[in-house]
Image (cartoon, rainbow, N blue to C red):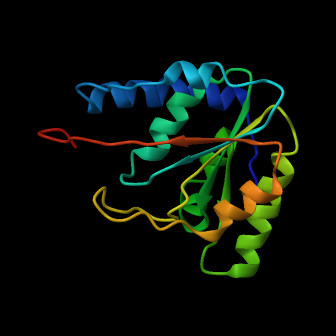
């Protein structure tokens, strides 16, 4: 398991880079309910779970993180991807290896420990893989485990949808 290794300086620099990248790739981004992210309670940890239909999802979640200034934000990421993009650990990403129940359990225990702190917010993609938007959502059991074993955590569902025309 690859733990998060948050670095505020790298985070600030990469935020500027990713914000510019998103502006260059998207013609418009429309969102509802962003005030709820800004107003999350400071006295409870937060588990945000989101559908996973596009490789942009992680970047959009990261950018939305800026609305949660009072939270230390983390994200569960597939281990083989995190090995390739190791710098994401500096932004709060930690790994999960879905091919191994033992290694998956270690990641869930790590997330559970993080959720014991009120200032923590964790993004997860319960599907565990990219899925087409029109597919039924199949949720991996780790989501249930985290919800049951972190009773103080506030559970926040987030849904994303992309409409691509000429953009990528």
In front of the other: 67 or 47: 47
Residue 2 at least partly seen: no
Residue at 82%, 58% in the rendered image: 149
Quadrant into which the C terminus falls: top left
* Image quadrant in which you'd find residue 10: top right
Residue 108, percent from left and from top: 75, 63
Q: Quadrant of residue 116?
A: top right
Count of numbered marks = 0
Q: Is 82 rendered above or below residue 50?
A: below
Instruction: Look at 73% across and 64% down and name the residue there.
Output: 145
Report the front residue among 129 and 86.
129
Location of the N terminus by quadrant is bottom right
Q: Is residue 71 left or right of residue 43?
A: left
Query: Which residue is more in the foreground, 147 or 29?
Result: 147
Residue 120: percent from left, percent from top: 77, 37
Query: Is residue 11 toward the left or the right of residue 42 in the image?
Result: left
34 sits to left or right of 74: left
Residue 156 falls in which quadrant of the image?
top right
82 or 64: nearer the viewer:
64
Above or below — where is 81 with respect to 17? below
Residue drawn 26% across and 24% down? 28
Q: Is residue 77 above or below residue 89?
A: below
Residue 99, image x and y in percent?
Answer: 60, 80
């Amino acid at each position: 398991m690859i733990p998060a290794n948050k670095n505020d300086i790298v985070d600030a620099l990469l935020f500027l880079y990713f914000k510019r990248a998103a502006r260059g790739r998207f013609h418009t981004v429309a969102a509802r309910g962003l005030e709820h992210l800004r107003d999350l309670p400071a006295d409870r940890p937060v588990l945000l779970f989101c559908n996973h239909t596009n490789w942009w999802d992680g970047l959009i979640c990261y950018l939305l993180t800026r609305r949660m200034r009072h939270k230390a934000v983390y994200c569960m990421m597939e281990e083989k991807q995190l090995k390739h993009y190791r710098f994401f650990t500096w932004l709060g990403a930690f790994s999960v290896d879905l091919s191994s129940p033992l290694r998956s359990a270690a990641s869930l225990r790590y997330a559970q420990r993080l959720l014991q702190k009120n200032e923590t917010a964790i993004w997860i993609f319960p599907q565990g893989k990219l899925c087409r938007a029109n597919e039924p959502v199949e949720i991996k059991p780790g989501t249930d485990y985290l919800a049951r074993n972190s009773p103080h955590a506030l559970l926040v569902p987030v849904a994303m949808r992309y409409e691509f025309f000429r953009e990528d």
